[in-house]
Amino acid sequence: LERTLVLVKPDGVRRGLAGEVIGRIEAKGYRLVALDLRTPDAALLAEHYAEHEGKPFYAPLVEFMGSGPVVALVAEGQRVIEGFRSLAGATDPTAAAPGTIRGDLGRDWGLAVQQNLVHGSDSPVSAAREIGLWFPAL
Ligand code: ATP
């Protein structure tokens, strides 16, 4: 069975939407295998977002992601990597389809693309790497 790393980003936790996101994951039938609330430090975020280093949105993104607690979780299920990304919807919440987490709950607060509520691993290779970073004991 496949596993993926999901983050409820600081905007999602601040807005009280962690339970809603977890509920959608469970309602879809995925199983939670790890769950933690924590404020990630700069070193973890630098590794997590290494592929974006050098892009204009990188520094503000890392700062935002460290601005408060996030819910990190590992979900397991058939095709969960792709499945969670379709639950999440398009990266930009103003473009995300209704029925998706970002489409239903995301708004353009001025930083819509940065503050898009959730992260989900985008491939088996990223999932293994990200699960290792956030949950080294797994
Ligand atoms: P994630 O990997 O977080 O699920 P994604 O794969 O949909 O998101 P990526 O292109 O990998 O999007 O970007 C990673 C994150 O960087 C986005 O979720 C968003 O928070 C931020 N981001 C991406 N593009 C921009 C942008 N143009 N301006 C601000 N933030 C951005």
Image (cartoon, rainbow, N blue to C red):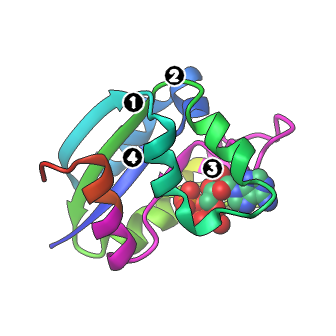
Answer whether labels 1 and 4 touch (C-beta < 8 Å): no
Ligand 1's quadrant? bottom right
Position above or below: 43 against 131: above
Residue 102: image tag = 3
* Residue drawn at x 30%, y 75% as measured from the top left: 79
Compare marks 4 and 3 and give the one earlier in the sequence.
4
Mark closer to the observer (2, 4): 2
Position above or below: 2 against 134: below
- Whole-Å distance between the Cαs marked 1 and 4? 9 Å
Front residue of 63/107: it is 63
Q: Badge 4: how crowded within 10 Å, few (<14), some, or many (20+)?
A: some
* Residue drawn at x 40%, y 77% as measured from the top left: 123
* Residue drawn at x 47%, y 25% as measured from the top left: 69
Q: Badge 1: how crowded within 10 Å, few (<14), some, or many (20+)?
A: few
SS class, disc 3: helix
Compare marks 3 and 1 and give the one earlier in the sequence.
1
Q: Is residue 100 left or right of residue 128?
A: right
